[in-house]
Image (spheres, helix red, strand yellow):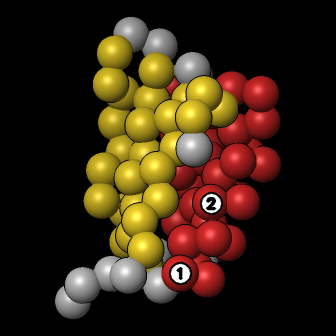
Amino acid sequence: MLEPALGMIEFKSIAKGILATDAIAKKAPIKILSTNPVCPGKYLIIFAGEVADVEESMNAGLIAGGDMVIND
């Protein structure tokens, strides 16, 4: 099944990235495509799903990440 929307958030804290991954997964029915450290101290989450679901999960991830969000 092709997903119509893709979301990505980068964090400058691995711990906040893991916390945000949990919030993203629990907010809406999306598919986590990748969630892992990309270099020392940074964390990347990539997820896909329906447009509204990705938007809801993106907002939940940004709130959970707080000031540790580098890029969305």
Name the mark on residue 68.
Answer: none
- Point out residue 18 in the picture as x, y percentages from the top left corner: 53, 40
Left or right: 68 as drawn, with respect to 26: right
Checking the image for residue 58, the label placed there is 2
Q: Is residue 23 left or right of residue 4?
A: right
* Residue nearer the viewer, 38 or 14: 38
Residue 47 is situated, as x and y percent measured from the top left of the image, at: 41, 61
Q: Nearer the viewer, mark 1 or mark 2?
A: 1
What residue is pinned by disc 1? 51
**Mark 1 surroundings within 10 Å by alpha-carbon count, few (fewer than 14), some (14 through 19), many (20 or more):** some
Q: Position of residue 41 (x, y in %)?
A: 47, 13
Could you tell me which quadrant the C terminus lies in? top right
Q: Which residue does the image show at 55% across and 72% down from the upper left?
A: 54
Q: Report whether residue 15 is seen.
A: no
SS at mark 1 in the image: helix
Query: Residue 23 in the image: x percent, y percent?
Result: 64, 58
Local crowd size for mark 2, using a 10 Å CA cut-off: few (<14), some (14–19), many (≥20): many
- Residue drawn at 70 percent across, 47 percent down: 62
